[in-house]
Image (cartoon, grey):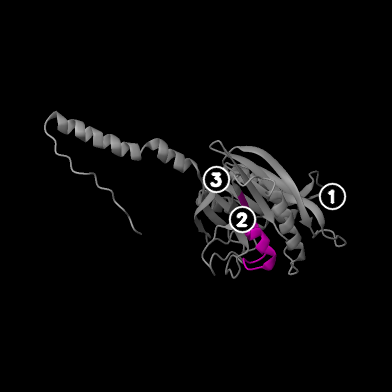
Amino acid sequence: MYTHRVHPFPVRVRGRSAVAAALTIVLMVLAFTTPAAASTDSARVLRVMTYNIHTGIGVDGRADLERIAAVVRQADVDVVGLQEVDVHWSDRSAYADQVAELARLTGMSAFFAPIYDLDPEPGHEERRRYGVAILSAHPILSTTNHRITRWSTVDPDAEPEPGPGFAEVVLSVHGRPVHVYSTHLDYRPDPSVRQRQVEDTLHILGRQPESAPQVLLGDFNAEPSAPELAPLFAHVRDAWRVPDSGLTFPADDPVKRIDYVTVAGPVRVLDAAVPVTTASDHRPVVATLQVR
C-alpha cells in the first residue's frame, strides 16, 4: 500500500510567535481530523450478512437455533437476510417461531416474509409458515412482502405463478433510508423459473431511483456465471470480487458460490468474507458497506 505523507512547512518563530504558530499548526491538523468528519464516515458503514439457515439444521443433522444466532453475533453485523426460516412449520424445527427466537437471541428487530402460509397441523393452533426474513439493528421504517414467480414445493400440481416471499425493508441508517431485500431463488436445475424471478426482481428494484441505496441479499441457487443471473448483475454489483473463491455450499466442504451480497445505488463495498461454520448446510456471506 502506498501512503502519501504531507509534512508541514518549516516555521521559524521566537517567543510568543512560537506559541501562536504552534497553535495555528494544531488547529490546522484538527481541521483535517475533526471527530465530526470521522463520525460521519463511521455512521455510513453498514455490516450485512446473508444466511440460508436451513431451518436451523446443521451439517450434523441437529436443529440448534442458538448456533445460528451465535454465527450472527460473532460476525458483528447490523443487518441479516435469512432464507429457509420456519414459523410453527413442523416438528423439524419443534414448531418454533424461528423469526421471533432469532430476534430475541440477537437483540435485533425482525421482518418475516412467508412464502407458504398453511393451515395448522392437527393438534396445533398456529398457522404453518415458511419463508425469508430480515433482522436489523437499525430502525425499520417500512416492510413489504413482494410477489415474484414461484413454483411451489408443497403442491405437486402447481405451476409457476406469482407468489409472496421476497422481503423488503426500508431501514433508517443514521437517518438515511436504505432498502434491504432478502430473497431465495428456485433451486431446480432448469433455470427458467430463476430467469422469471430475476425479471420480477429487477422490476421491483427498478421502482427506486438511482440515488436510493439498495442491498439485495439471498440464496440465488446459481453460480455467478449462470446466464439467468446476468441481467441481475447488470443492475446490482456483487460484493465478492475474487474469482473462484467465496464458496458457500455445502457448508462442510463448499464447491459452489450460490449465496450473495449485492448492492446498487450509492453503496460502496469495503470488504467481504465467508465465515467458516457448519451451523447450517450453507455458509453465510458477510460484507462491510459504506452508504455514500
Front: mark 1 or 2 = 2
Q: Is residue 228 above or below residue 23?
A: below
Q: Is residue 169 above or below residue 150?
A: above
Q: Which residue is mark 3?
A: 78
Give the percent coordinates (x, y) of residue 197.
74, 58
Q: Nearer the viewer, mark 2 or mark 3?
A: 2
| Earlier residue among tags 3 and 1 | 3
- Residue density around tag 3, few if under 14, some if 14–19, many if 20 or more, within 10 Å: some
The magenta region covers 215-234
Query: What residue type is disc 2 on?
Result: Val
Q: Nearer the viewer, residue 116 or 245?
A: 245
Say which residue appears at 72% left-offset and 56% top-offset: 92
Mark 2, secondary structure of its residue: loop
Label 2 to label 3, Cα distance in Å?
A: 20 Å
Please tell me whether residue 174 belongs to the stretch shown in magenta.
Answer: no
Q: Are marks 2 and 3 in contact (CB under 8 Å)?
A: no
> In this view, which residue lies farthest toward the left?
14
Q: Residue at x 68, y 46 (%)?
A: 168
Give amino acid for label 3.
Asp
Q: Nearer the viewer, mark 3 or mark 1?
A: 3
Q: Position of residue 65 (x, y in %)?
A: 62, 52
The picture places residue 105, in percent across and down from the top left corner, at 59, 45
Tell which circle, 1 or 2, labels the residue nearer the N-terminal end. 1
All told, the count of numbered labels is: 3
The N terminus lies in quadrant? bottom left
